């Protein structure tokens, strides 16, 4: 036991003496969470719009006022002709143009098919869709407010409610994603690099000749990173809850236990990587390539898995982060318990065992 | 006195390649045993089998009285090892390195400070006790690595080309440390390709292409081959040429 403690102590010296390592370890999560939480958001606020009012009536004025009062839109300019619309879009001044045709009021008040044209800049397609949806809803609202009684017969009133995240906050999606990414990256990258470094400097050989068993060496490598990564996970959860107002509806204990499981998986992947590579540099690239890119693109963190082509959907099944993100979302936002989350949990357990066994089998012959 | 190392037809194959081919030799306790050979002659492979890093393909060997197949854990407890890369942690201080190696070799916590002071005094490096090893000159690192390998008072210490890359004076000083250890009863098993160092050994073996071609005292070898330096003996055996 004393031997093991001496080993773990040494690992902490390595980590604490390496400024770059410390920066990656604790700077990365902070920057990521704050970046994704505050800067990179897909919520729409104060989108710039232009109005082309060819009707100049009370109705057109009121609809405009209602749009601007919603908080989603901000008036950039009042246009005078159709050619102005194109100019404004080309110069990137506006995201949306609202056109009231001449005779709008006349059509509206005589029950004819009154039209308003919405033109959106679809170079950002998601924004365009959201903006036209918001604007349509506001305009529809205006008409129903005007004649609450004279509804035509047989109307289906569709009411949608955004369950779990009524305000459609981006942080709800990003916090679990960032957590998965940071933990995976930090744990896998750090362990693979630290073992590769011992191999490179020849100290691994000396450790193998020493009375330390292989298990003690591996465990000694894993324990410090397990502790530090767990601390990291707690920081991210705290930032999410207190700074970004992500709810914590489920059990904190379960969330921490799942986090620990995920870290263990990441560490076993890190050891696996170090068992197949020769140098620190290769270890670093392998970790980045094998961890970071698939986690960002295929875990559902940024792009929904449902909208991927079939082959990529299949590939996404082997991305550990996919399961962890599902678990974190389940616990934090939906308040789900293990009863609902046992499947992804089991997958993570299975993956951990797989990589642990694989790296143990690989490491032994590779050390000698 | 028992033998420190006994091998009998010790062989290691990697696929079709025979790295160490049926070598048989004994090393006496307290002896300085030189293990010579060109790069790729099989020295490192043989040494790794004796240290428990590699399983032999066939043949027998025992180190410090323990069998290499069945008792490698016992062997590890009784040997010291220093590789050509010195195997100290550069981002740890001198003191921390000593404490670490003392720790993993199971020294009691109470005896480590005294051991540390003893090493620092012997090497005359008290002034850098709390400096990072990275800042030390090569010769100091080397002597420190050797002292660390002896920290747990092993019966045998294996040195794998310990003097690579240092100047002749430092090498001479390093050999003084080796003599001192041997004098205190530690068996020293050393690989080298410096022929002047071969002269310092009690007995020398020369490996060529996985086989042990010669084993005797330096004087005995020189007489047998009728030359006046170990370098000449090595030329005859390893290259098949005579320098005369």
Image (cartoon, helix red, strand yellow):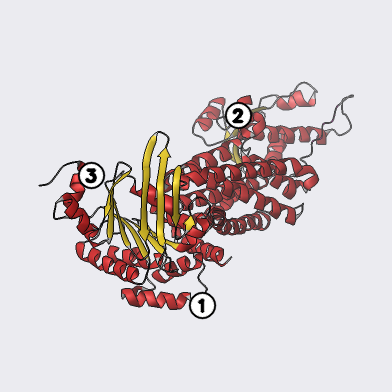
Element marked by disc 3: helix
- Cα–Cα gap, marks 3 and 2: 59 Å
Q: Chain of mark 1?
A: B
Instruction: Check disc 1: other Cα within 10 Å, few if <14, some if 14-19, many if 20+.
Output: few
Quick check: do tags 1 and 2 share a chain? no
Q: Is residue B122 above or below residue B78?
A: below
Q: Chain of mark 3?
A: B
- Residue B238: image tag: 3
Magenta includes A158? yes
- Cα–Cα gap, marks 3 and 1: 50 Å
Q: Which residue is mark 1?
A: B110
Given contact means CB atoms under 8 Å apart, are the residues at marks 3 and 1 in contact?
no
Q: Please tell me which residue lies in front, A24 or A146.
A: A24
Query: Which mark is nearer the camera, 1 or 2?
Result: 1
Q: Main secondary structure of the magenta part?
A: loop
Q: Please tell me which residue lies in front, B123 or B128.
A: B123
- Residue A312: image tag: 2
């Amino acid at each position: 036991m004393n031997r093991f403690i001496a080993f773990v102590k040494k690992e902490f010296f390595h980590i604490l003496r390496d400024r770059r390592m410390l920066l990656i370890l604790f700077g990365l999560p902070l920057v990521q969470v704050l970046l994704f939480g505050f800067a990179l958001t897909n919520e729409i606020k104060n989108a710039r719009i232009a109005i082309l009012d060819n009707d100049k009536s009370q109705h057109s004025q009121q609809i405009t006022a209602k749009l601007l009062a919603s908080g989603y839109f901000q008036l950039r300019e009042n246009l005078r002709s159709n050619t102005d619309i194109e100019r404004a879009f080309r110069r990137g001044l506006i995201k949306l143009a609202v056109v009231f045709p001449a005779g709008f009021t006349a059509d509206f008040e005589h029950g004819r098919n009154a039209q308003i044209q919405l033109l959106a800049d679809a170079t950002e397609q998601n924004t365009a869709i959201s903006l036209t949806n918001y604007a349509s809803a506001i305009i529809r609202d205006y008409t129903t407010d005007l004649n609450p009684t004279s509804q035509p017969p047989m109307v289906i009133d569709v009411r949608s409610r955004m369950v779990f995240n009524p305000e459609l906050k981006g942080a709800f999606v990003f916090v679990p994603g960032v957590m998965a990414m940071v933990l995976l990256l930090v744990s896998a990258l750090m362990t693979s690099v630290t073992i590769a470094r011992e191999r490179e400097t020849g100290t691994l050989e000396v450790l193998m000749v020493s009375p330390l068993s292989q298990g003690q060496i591996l465990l000694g490598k894993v324990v410090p990173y397990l502790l530090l990564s767990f601390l990291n996970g707690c920081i991210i959860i705290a930032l999410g809850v207190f700074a970004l107002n992500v709810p914590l509806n489920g059990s904190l204990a379960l969330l921490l236990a799942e986090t620990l499981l995920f870290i263990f998986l990441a560490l076993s992947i890190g050891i696996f990587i170090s068992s197949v590579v020769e140098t620190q540099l290769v270890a670093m690239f392998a970790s980045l390539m094998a961890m970071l890119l698939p986690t960002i693109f295929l875990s559902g963190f940024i792009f929904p898995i449902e909208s991927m082509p079939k082959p990529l959907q299949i590939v996404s099944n082997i991305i550990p982060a996919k399961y962890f993100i599902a678990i974190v979302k389940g616990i934090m936002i939906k308040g789900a318990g293990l009863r609902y989350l046992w499947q992804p949990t089991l997958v993570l357990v299975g993956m951990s065992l797989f990589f642990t066994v694989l790296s143990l089998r690989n490491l032994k012959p590779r050390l000698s | 006195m028992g033998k420190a190392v006994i091998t009998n037809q010790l062989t290691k194959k990697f696929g079709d390649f025979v790295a160490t081919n049926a070598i048989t030799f004994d090393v006496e306790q307290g002896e300085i045993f030189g293990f010579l050979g060109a790069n790729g002659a099989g020295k490192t492979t043989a040494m790794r089998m004796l240290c428990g890093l590699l399983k032999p393909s066939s043949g027998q060997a025992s180190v410090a009285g323990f069998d290499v197949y069945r008792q490698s854990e016992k062997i590890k407890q009784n040997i010291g090892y220093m590789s050509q890369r010195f195997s100290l942690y550069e981002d740890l201080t001198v003191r921390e390195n000593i404490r670490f190696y003392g720790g993993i070799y199971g020294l009691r916590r109470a005896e480590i400070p005294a051991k540390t002071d003893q090493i620092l005094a012997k090497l005359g490096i008290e002034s850098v006790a709390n400096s990072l090893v990275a800042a030390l000159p090569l010769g100091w690192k080397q002597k420190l690595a050797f002292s660390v390998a002896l920290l747990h008072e092993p019966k045998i210490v294996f040195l794998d080309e310990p003097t690579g890359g240092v100047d002749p004076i430092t090498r001479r000083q390093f050999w003084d440390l080796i003599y001192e250890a041997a004098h205190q009863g530690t068996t020293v098993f050393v690989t080298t390709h410096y022929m002047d160092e071969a002269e310092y050994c009690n007995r020398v073996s020369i490996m060529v292409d996985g086989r042990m071609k010669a084993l005797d005292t330096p004087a005995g070898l020189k007489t047998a081959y009728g030359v006046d330096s170990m370098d000449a003996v090595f030329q005859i055996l390893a290259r098949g040429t005579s320098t005369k």
